[in-house]
Image: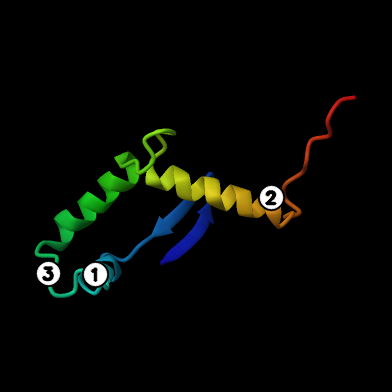
Amino acid sequence: MEVKVSNKHVVLKLPIDTLVYAFNFKEDNQEQYKVKNKKRFAEGIAHYLQNYSSNGESGLTVFQEVLDEIFDEMVCNAEDYIKELQEEE
């Protein structure tokens, strides 16, 4: 996986072959399922990243949930590129 910042975008590159390998050798389906069409599989990954929600209460997509976890971790680690707003008294 490659992640870089380019102009106004964070660009994630996930090699399709890596995703196929991860699926084919996923511990709980090694003997049961294999990818048969890499391009359509990759399109499915893109669709699910944009649309699938595992949390019915929040309605957030899986990708949004990952981002929320990253944001929380950044705050917990007190990253110097994030500032805490002072509460007004």
Give amino acid for label 1: Asp
Q: Residue furthest right?
A: 89
The three-letter amino acid code for the residue at tag 3 is: Gln
Q: Residue 77 appears at what percent x and percent y?
A: 71, 57
Reading the image, the residue beneath label 2 is: 75
> Does dot 1 land on a helix, a strand or a loop?
loop
Instruction: From the image, tell me which residue sits under label 1.
Output: 28
Q: Nearer the viewer, mark 1 or mark 2?
A: 1
Residue at the outermost left position: 36
Judge whether 26 appears above or below 14 on screen: below
Determine the CA span between mark 1 and mark 2.
34 Å
Q: Residue at x 45, y 43 (%)?
A: 64
Residue 23: which quarter of the image? bottom left
Work out whether residue 66 or residue 29 is closer to the camera in this orientation and state it: 29
Above or below, 52 against 16 in this view is above
Question: Which tag, 2 or 3, sits closer to the chain's start?
Answer: 3
Q: Are marks 1 and 2 in contact (CB under 8 Å)?
A: no
- Who's the residue at 11% across and 61% down the image? 37
13 sits to left or right of 77:
left
Q: Which SS class for mark 2?
A: helix
Question: Which numbered marker is on residue 76?
Answer: none
Q: Amino acid at mark 2?
A: Val
Mark identifier at residue 32: 3
Q: Return the x and y of residue 28 as percentages of the image width and height.
A: 24, 69
Badge 1, how many Cα within 10 Å: few under 14, some, many 20+?
A: few
How far apart are the two marked residues, 2 and 3, measured between alpha carbons?
41 Å
Q: Who's the residue at 72% across and 50% down the image? A: 81
Residue 7 visible somewhere in the drawing: no
